[in-house]
Image (cartoon, rainbow, N blue to C red):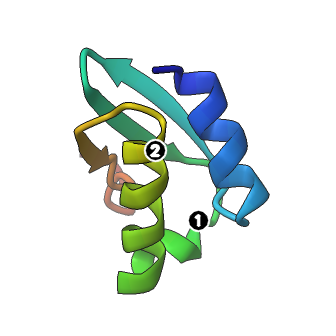
């Protein structure tokens, strides 16, 4: 299980994000515009790739609201 390897696999499929590993949870932190994660297909791909890399769960960090907290 490697966060770096998952990040590379996601990038190869056009999903630009950083990956933080928390045990078997992969937290995806989108870089700039990660529109692929806003579609069901993109999320399914991210989950499939995460499972292929040994993760059991995926979370996507949401962008902060405009204007701050």
Query: How far from the left and from the top, in percent, is residue 6?
Result: 57, 37
Provide residue 30's location: percent of width, then percent of height. 53, 50
Residue denoted by label 1: 34
Can you say which quadrant of the picture contains the N terminus?
Answer: top left
Which residue is depicted at the point 49% across and 52% down? 49
Sequence order check, earlier mark of 1 and 2 = 1
Disc number for residue 21: none
Q: Nearer the viewer, residue 54 or 63?
A: 54
Residue 21 sits in which quadrant? top left
Q: Is residue 2 left or right of residue 62?
A: right
Can you give x and y, in whole percent of width and height, for residue 24 in the image?
Answer: 25, 24
Residue at the spot x=43%, y=24% of the render?
Answer: 20
Q: Quadrant of the C terminus?
A: top left
Nearer the camera: disc 1 or disc 2: 2
Residue 2 lies, with reference to residue 5, above or below; the image says: above
Which residue is found at the position 65% from the left and 56% from the top? Answer: 32
- Mark 2: secondary structure: helix
Circle 2 sits on which residue? 52
Residue 1 vertical placement versus 30 (above, below): above
Q: Is residue 17 above or below residue 13?
A: above
| Rendered view: 14 above or below 2 | below
- Extreme residue toward the right, this view: 12
Residue ID at (33%, 51%): 60
């Amino acid at each position: 299980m490697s966060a770096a390897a998952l990040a590379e696999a996601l990038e190869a499929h056009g999903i630009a994000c950083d990956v933080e590993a928390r045990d078997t949870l992969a937290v995806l932190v989108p870089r700039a515009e990660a529109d692929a994660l806003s579609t069901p297909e993109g999320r399914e791909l991210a989950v499939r790739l995460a499972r292929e890399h040994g993760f059991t769960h995926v979370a996507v960090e949401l962008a902060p609201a405009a204007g701050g907290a």
